[in-house]
Image (cartoon, rainbow, N blue to C red):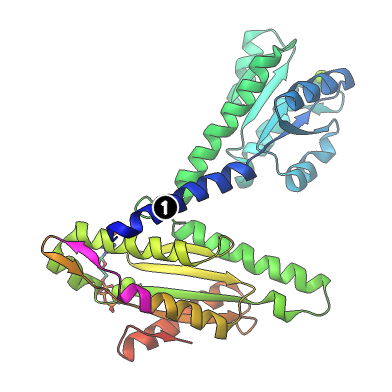
Amino acid sequence: IPAEDQPAMVLNCILDLVQTKEQEQYRVLVVEDSRVAVALIQRTLAQHGIDTHAINDPGKLLDALESYKPDLVLMDMYMPRFNGVEATRVLRQMAAYSSLPIVYLSGESEVGMQVEALRLGGDQFLMKPFNPVLLAAVVKTRIERFREVRRSTRLDGLTGLFNHTAAKSRLKALVNEIDDSAATESEALRGNELTVAMIDIDHFKAINDTYGHPVGDQVIRGLAWLLKGRLRSIDLIGRYGGEEFLIALPGVGPDKAIAVIDRIRRDFSGLPHAQPDGALYATFSAGIASYPAMSAAAALTEAADGALLQAKRLGRNRVEY
Ligand code: GH3
Ligand code: MG
Ligand code: MG
Ligand code: MG
Ligand code: MG
């Protein structure tokens, strides 16, 4: 990355941080049968800027998890029609909730029972009556820790982009979003476009062989940096494989997408990458596919892959649709 571009890169990183910080609130689902306890918990957490939603009925648990999407569950142990420990045990068997932070808040004072509750899936045990400052601190630190772990499992270490698994699931989510909106709105299309690009650096093996692996890594990071700078925050950018990137542009049709990716292609080919004796230049090829022509995530990536192969066949450093 050229020295003069480094301040821009630092600025981008700062903007990323600011953006994610703004979006991050804390959402806690309170499962509790006592109205008095609910009021006390909600007031305490609200004072610490934590959003809450409370339920007292076991039948509402899964619905509440799905619609409210909490970052943590604060679970009472004993409720008239509801055993918090049993509910926790069930949640732990569901893939979607196997690692969701669950903290018990209960009057149960017998250590044997507390241990059993933890063994069946809770992360921590807090006693009633609770200390408000401790409760808020436990909630926030548990959520922060969980987010940190989730971030690191979704992101690629070299580039900070989504990794293969995360990129694929994000693409699926984008396609589902269009399907949902198309189902409710009658005048579909235009706003519901989605274009996918598969990008692969040309002759990358030769770069590695000539300049060494660390220089190859820098070329990958350089492309990641260019993509981050050029695409919008709503666009999906993933490191799909070693020197292969998956891009998804919501609301963008094929013509516009081809122009955008081709512009990045041209600029990448002019981007100098440092190597011990000076600079080296690299190129990439790209394949494009669009929704609704391809209406499933797998079909989109497959079609983009096919177009990428065509771009390679036709001589590389080009974009094919
Ligand atoms: P083509 O133009 O057809 O894409 O040729 P290519 O040489 O780019 O493609 P090929 O798939 O043969 O080589 C990709 C190479 O990328 C092989 C692999 O060793 C290397 N690679 C994969 N991941 C990394 C990485 O994280 N860092 C570096 N430096 N190299 C990597
Ligand atoms: Mg109770
Ligand atoms: Mg290859
Ligand atoms: Mg390649
Ligand atoms: Mg490749």
Q: In this rendering, would 151 be left or right of 42?
A: left
Along the line of sight, which residue is nearer the eye, 279 or 302?
279
Which of 315 and 173 lies nearest the eye of the viewer?
A: 315
Asked if one can make out residue 36 in the rendered structure from this viewpoint, the answer is yes
Residue 213 found in image quarter: bottom left
Measuring 23% from the left and 63% from the top, which residue is drawn there? 216
Residue 201 appears in the figure: no
Q: Is residue 273 magenta?
A: yes
Picture residue at 44% right of the left edge, 56% below the top:
161
Q: Amino acid at mark 1?
A: Gly
Q: Residues within 10 Å of mark 1 (few under 14, many from 20)?
A: some
Number of numbered discs visible in the structure rendering: 1
Tell me the magenta residue range. 266-275
Pinpoint residue 114: horizontal percent, then vertical percent. Answer: 64, 15
In the figure, residue 32 lies in which quadrant? top right
Relative vertical location of residue 160 with respect to residue 313 in this rendering, above or below: above
- Residue 106 is left or right of residue 142, and the answer is right
Q: Is residue 20 magenta?
A: no
Q: In the displayed image of the protein, which residue is found farthest to the top?
A: 110
Q: Secondary structure at mark 1?
A: loop
Which residue is at a point 62% across and 85% down the rendered structure image? 293
Quarter of the rendering occupied by the N terminus = bottom left
User: Which residue has dot 1 on it?
Assistant: 160
In this rendering, position of residue 246 left or right of residue 47: left
